[in-house]
Image: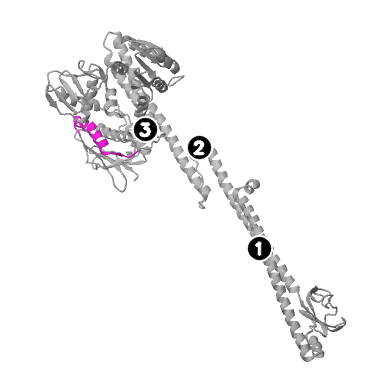
Amino acid sequence: MKILLAEDDARTADFIASGLGEMGHSVDHVSDGREALTYCLYNTCDLAILDRMMPGMDGLSVVKALRAARKDLPVLILSAMADVTQRVEGLAAGADDYLVKPFHFSELAARVVTLSRRRGEVVQTSVLTVADLTLDLLSRSARRGGQAIDLQAKEFALLEVLMRHAGRVVTRTMLLEQVWNFNFEPNTTVVETHVSRLRAKVDKPFATALIQTVRSTGYMMNGPR
Amino acid sequence: MDRGSVTSGAAFTTALRGTGVLLGILLVTGFLSFTYIQHHMMDDLKDRISEDFTVLDEINRDSGQAALIDTLAALRQPIGRALRSFGMFDRAGQHLAGDITALPAQSGWSQSAGQMAQGSPHLLLRRDTGAHILVIGRNIEDIAEKERQLILTLVAAGGILALSFLLIGYRSSASSLRKLDGIAKVLAQVSQGDSAVRLHISPQNDQIDRVAVAINRNLDQLSNMIATTKVSAAAIAHDLRTPLSRAFLAIDQAQMQAERGADPRDALDVASGELTRLRSIFDVILRISRLSQESTPTAAQPLAPLLADLAETFAPVAEENGQSLTLHPVDPGLVIAADGAMISQMLANLLQNALNHCPIGTQIAFGAQGGAGGLHLWVADTGPGIPLAERDKVFALFYRLDPSRTGGGNGLGLALVKAIADQLGARITLSDAQPGLRVDIAFAP
């Protein structure tokens, strides 16, 4: 995948570029907002990673300009601004995802993978299926192997996020953002507790476990949908 | 004090202008009343002279010229100032009787000072009776004297009023200037770093005093902020150093492990965990400082779903910890005019705090009540509680009951709760739940 990285801090850019390179992506790096906009307008690339604060033009303005020019490539904003409201601002400007600095590379990697697939697939279906597990978004019901599973609202939301990203890592932070969307204390066990409850209902009574733990990163739903 | 600054003060210039206006009014009304009184007195005098003429004319007509001459002689006042004087002349102008010896040139009213022996000015009436000419006069010195007194009174009143006006203006201007000088002096001291000085408030409670009260209030806030910043800077430095040094150690350990061919991943996980902790501290500090800057008006929104969401999020965690967490039934009609995310954040921190600091078996409950006194949210637990002496301190940045700082929290949770409550204009109180801690957040009605 061809990725544009717009980041004015050279060291951070090097780390990200080499990490993404190791994942098999080809990365072009610019360190100025205007350059980033020009690049995206006149070159084809599969994903843009934009720093929010850059010389020349800030990341949000670049996204807005891209969307105004009907360029719909996936955009991930990197920012040191951590608040929920600032994240919402970023998404409202047209970004597809918003990652707060400092971050673990595994967090960025998980989001890049998610974004690379998001564009190709149009998830309009009202039923998600992974192996013998189905989740009906309209009737808000879950079944596995023909057996109905009773889920609470948060468990349902959690399962929906995991199933939408089946085969890909979903980080703890992504779950907190998409299921709860407010700032937890760092030592909260909210995600672990809810995932463990979900497992007790979705995996435990059955022969194969679908929800896997990914060491120090998050969780993954088994296999492609 | 510089006299020039006093006389240019607002109070004095107002008094000066007031004095000008007052003297103008006094001049006009004084002139009008003076002419009115003068006319009135003269008319009165003329009436009396006319009556005298009528009486004398009747005597002449009824009893003849000899009787009139006798009467005039009897009326003559030989000693002192003559109030009245008379003269009788024949038609050729020859003096016949009375103390007026010179005939006024024209008949009718005239004034004269010279015709009388006493020489005081008189108002004269010359009139023909047919047989002779009668001249009757009355002393007008009294009228002139009264006029002089009236003018004197008016001038004196004007002078006294003007003087007292100016004096009051000067004194009030001087007093204002003194207070303003005081304010300037105190502010100069503050700008030089002395945040403990305060303005003196006089018992007059005038506008300047009210400004001074407001300035003092701001100075209080300022010195609080300075004190908090000093404390926070020290606390931040300390609390950032702890995870930082742990991360250093873990990375060193990982390096050593890598050098001897061992798996460094566990040590790197520790380093990464400590750095994550560090990041979260930065996040919360930034969030707190942002909170005190921004304010967003928000529409009223239902509270019950928000609280149910929190209960659903934290009850499983409590259960996992061997604790219990229950939401008291909330009136579904209850609404709150505040950012829902802020309310969630505040309650989430309080709930997480209870989960972190209470032992197994603790019951945690929370809820909301409406009513005339305004909306009120509460969180209570049956845990160890907070000693009375510590209750005010727990909202400070990095404050922890456990001074060894080995416990789970970063000492910022309650500081964030307080910052949000301040932002929403709510009051937080901690009390003894007997046993345990009860936190109440009261919103103004």
Q: Residue furthest bottom?
A: B63
Q: Is residue B304 magenta?
A: yes
Is residue B88 shown left or right of residue B305?
Answer: right
Check the residue under mark 1 and report the chain it is in: B
Q: Looking at the image, is mark 2 or mark 3 nearer the viewer?
A: 3
In-front residue for pair B280/B112:
B112
Q: Out of B405 and A60, give the one closest to the viewer.
A: A60
Q: Which residues are magenta?
A: B299-323
Query: Which amino acid type is marked by label 1?
Result: Thr
Image coords of residue B344 (percent x, y) = 30, 34
Q: Residue at x 33, y 43 (%)?
A: B443
Residue B151 among those drawn in magenta: no
Up the image or down, B175 lies above or below A90; here it is below
Single out the mark in the foreground, 1 or 3.
1
Q: Is residue B237 visible?
A: yes
Is B11 or B299 nearer to us in this picture? B299
Quickly name the residue at label 1.
Answer: B29
Query: Sequence order check: which comes first, mark 2 or mark 3?
Result: 2
> Which residue: 70% across, 68% down?
B149
For image coordinates 77% across by 80% down, the residue present is B84
Tell me the residue that label 3 is attached to. Answer: B397
Q: Main secondary structure of the magenta part?
A: helix
**Real-space CA distance between mark 2 and mark 3, rounded to the nearest whole angstrom:** 24 Å
Whether the residues at callouts 1 and 3 have beta carbons within 8 Å, the answer is no
